[in-house]
Image: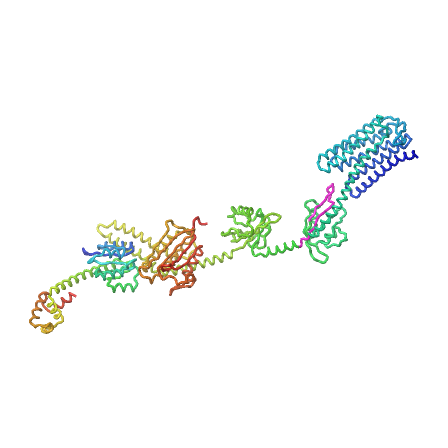
Amino acid sequence: MTEAAETIFLVDDDDAVLRAVGRLLRSAGCTVRSYPSAEEFIAAHHDGAMGCLVADISMPGRTGLELQEWLSHNQSALPIIFLTGCGDVPTSVRAMKGGAVDFLTKPVEEMELLEAVDAALQRGRRQRIAQADRDGARALLNTLTAREREVFDHLLTGRLNKQIAAALGTVEKTIKVHRARVLRKLGVSSIAELVHLAGRAK
Amino acid sequence: MHEISTMHWITVIWSAAGGACLMLALMHLVVWWRERRGWAHLSFFVMVAGVLGMAVCELLIMRTDSVGTASAAVRWAHGFTLLITVGCLGFVHFHFGTGRRWLLLLALGLRLIAVVANFTTGSSLHYRALHQLGKMNFMGEKVSVPAVWDPNPWLRLGQAAAFVLLIVVVDASLKLWRGGSPDGRRRAVLLGGSMTVFLLMAPVIAGLNAAGLVKMPLLASFPFLGMVLAMGYELSRGVLRAARLTTDLQQTETRLSQAATAARLGLWEWNLLTDSIWIPLEGRQLYGVGPDEVIDIQRFAATVHPEDRAGVNAAIAATLAGTAPYAADYRIILPDGRIRWIGAHGRVERDASGKAILLRGVSIDITERRLAEDRFRIVFEASPNALIVVDGEGIIVLANAQVEAVFGYSRPELTGHSIERLVPGRYHGHHPGHRRGYFTDPEPGARAMGSGRDLFGRHKAGHEVPVEIGLSPFRTSDGLFVLASIADITDRKHAEQETLRHHVELAHLGRVASLSELSGSLAHELNQPLAAILSNAQAALRFMEHDPPAAAEVREILTDIVGQGRRAGDVIRRMRRMLKKGELAMELLDPASLTEEVLSLMKSDLVAKNVRVTTHYPGDPLRVYGDRIQLQQVLLNLLANACEAMAGSSRDRRTIIVDLSGADGRMSLCVKDQGHGLTPGTEEKIFDPFHTTKADGLGMGLAICRSILTAHGGKLSAENHPEGGAVFRVELPLHEAEPP
């Protein structure tokens, strides 16, 4: 189910649950790493880990929600599934608002869990692709000189060459040259394509 | 003139001696006649009569010139020896009291035969025939004496009789001497000695006379006269002593009567022969009888209360029959109609034949005592407790009506029987020993029996009655007794059980409330294993479908499932136990493991509230005696309160410290939180029922906790910790030995 580099990170203070859920995921072909507390997970965590996190909410020490906050604070893209014994509404709302993929209550049906895990992994992958796309667009944008960047920003707002020249205090001809160079550098042939690229780089 | 005067001497002496003898004899005859018991006096009289007769005969012999008269006088003189012998033997017998009967009878028998021989053989025992009288000078006078005679060989018999008489006197005197009393010795020497001397003198004089060494008439009465004087002296001593005794007696009587008056005693004597009752003045006053009234048994019976007459008659009859000394308590009716209780005691006197002749005794006014007894009886009967008096052998002497009510026995079924009858069979082994121990060393004053233990009595119907017993020992002239006051506490036990039931119910309600507060946590505790089981099972199914199936994994999973199933079961069991409304089940418990169990029930709640619990247990496990559920309930309450108190504390100040220790026979368990602490001044109030600081609290939790601990002989207290937070301290007696 997981791809080569993907790992399911499991955090639960109940040893038995930790073992059982780990087994279930392994039996479904996942790579699983289990941690009895949020603190231990944090200690072992490295940036760029791929896969997803399945965490209990009510734990001694750092709780599941606190772990979620920590991850977002550390700009981790790891999708989170909460698996909790007492799923009250305020907690689940808070979890979902924080970006959780799913909020499951114990005991959990295997299909529910596996589907949630699958969804999380998908989201991860999508995020990774989007990230790669954005990174490429940003890299292209970074090849522009400062002047070209100014021209690029004006082009995005849909101004004409003349208007840009006036704004930059130069002649239209110069702007034309810049515009051609920007389009070539960014590998686009129209202003529409240029706007799309700018969107990817956000 | 000279002739006349000399002749006058003998006559004067003999007449004087005879007169004196006659006086003495008559005096003692009178004494005997009045007393009827002074047999020595009668004996003396007989002897003196004999001596007198003999003296007259001797005077006749001296004074006559006729052989016939002299012969007759000699014969009669021998006749009088019989009287002398009888008197002498009687005197020895009655006054000495030591004569051998057979010797006495032998002397008497010999003398009788001698006297018979005296009258049947010849002219007298001395002379077969007296032929001629001679004349001689005696005391300056010419007197006749026998001159020529044929001796009578039977005389030896007379001498033998005299000899045996002598032996009787000597023998009785020696025995009296050996008897050893000073008076007996004096009598033995004085009387026995003089009688022996005088008895010896007669044959000595006769012998000297016969040998012609002394010329004198045959004067046997003289030595006897000496004896008479000695005996008369002795008897008159008795009379003198009697006179002195009379004086003493009068004094004693005066004192006695004074004492009797003071003690309100009445002395009395009932002469059965004459049916006259002698009773002095104070006795008469006691019975309300006039000072000069003549009292016989009829008059006495008239004073006795009609209801008591039969009893008095029975007592008298028993006394006269000789079965018991006279003792009777009865009422008399005084002339003014008042009732007086009399206690009378007496003793019967009998004559030699055993016939009752006199009943002598004393009566006392026991009205006060009877009133006191009546009062005692009223109080004894009115007591709300069952009262039993038991003697040193454990025999029931007295029991009141309450005893019948409590134990179902009637009093005749108890009095005279052992107290063990009222003791349940299971105590029969120990109770007699305890009882004897108590009697050997009774504690003064009353005390409760079997302090600290539940006591039971045994009802006649066989069931046991819960009782409380107070013991108080008291000593009377009859020995040591114990008054046991027994309270039937069945009703109180019922009330106690009722209270206990309420207590149990309240505790149960408290537990239900605590658990419902914890229900989220409990659900979680149950959910965890269920979740593990479900995931495990589903994983196992998947592993089974692997090719090849992952058998090792599956086995591991199944082992885990078993464990988790048990875990869920434990949670359910603990929960059910806490929710159960059962009887108290006292057992030995380890407070540390109790705490752990409670913590495991609360685990999820603690986690959810971000509360850490640090426990300090002693190295060796402690033991307390108590009900597991109720004690866990206390811990649950205290821990839940501690959690709640810290709800507002920062994350790093949410630790509960449980500190368990044991010292000096007491266990102390402190639950310390880091919360807001107690409002100063409410350290005691928080234990009041319905005192609460929570918006939705009932305020019964701590009140129930305290009542649980009190029922366990423990304590629950609270205080603020100097570093902040509250400390709740649970104290319980440590159990060192086996439960009782």
Q: Position of residue B428 (x, y in %)?
A: 52, 47
Say above or below: B616 vs A151. above
User: Viewed as shown, does residue A179 lie left or right of B25?
Assistant: left
Q: Residue at x 82, y 39 (%)?
A: B24
Between A85 and B46, the one lying in front of the other is B46
Residue B220: image location, x then y, percent: 83, 32
Residue B12 screen position, x and y as percent: 88, 36
Q: Is residue A50 left or right of residue B566?
A: left
Among the 4 quarters of the image, the one containing residue B685:
bottom left
Q: Quadrant of the N terminus of chain B?
A: top right
Q: Main secondary structure of the magenta part?
A: strand
Q: Is B141 drawn above or below residue B697 in the view shown?
A: above
Instruction: In the displayed orientation, state which residue is furthest to the right.
Output: B1
Please name the residue shown 86% across and 31% down the image: B74
Q: How is the image coloured?
A: rainbow
Q: Nearer the viewer, residue B61 or B570?
A: B61
Residue B366 belongs to magenta span: yes
Residue B649 place in picture, x, y as percent: 33, 62
Left or right: B37, with B552 as reference point: right
Figure label count: 0
The answer to which quarter of the image holds residue B701 is bottom left
Q: Which quadrant holds residue A140?
A: bottom left
Answer whether residue B523 is visible to the viewer in this image: no
Q: Is residue A135 visible?
A: yes
Tell which of B51 and B590 is nearer to you: B51
Task: State yes or no: residue B88 in magenta.
Answer: no
Where are the magenta residues, as a range? B345-367
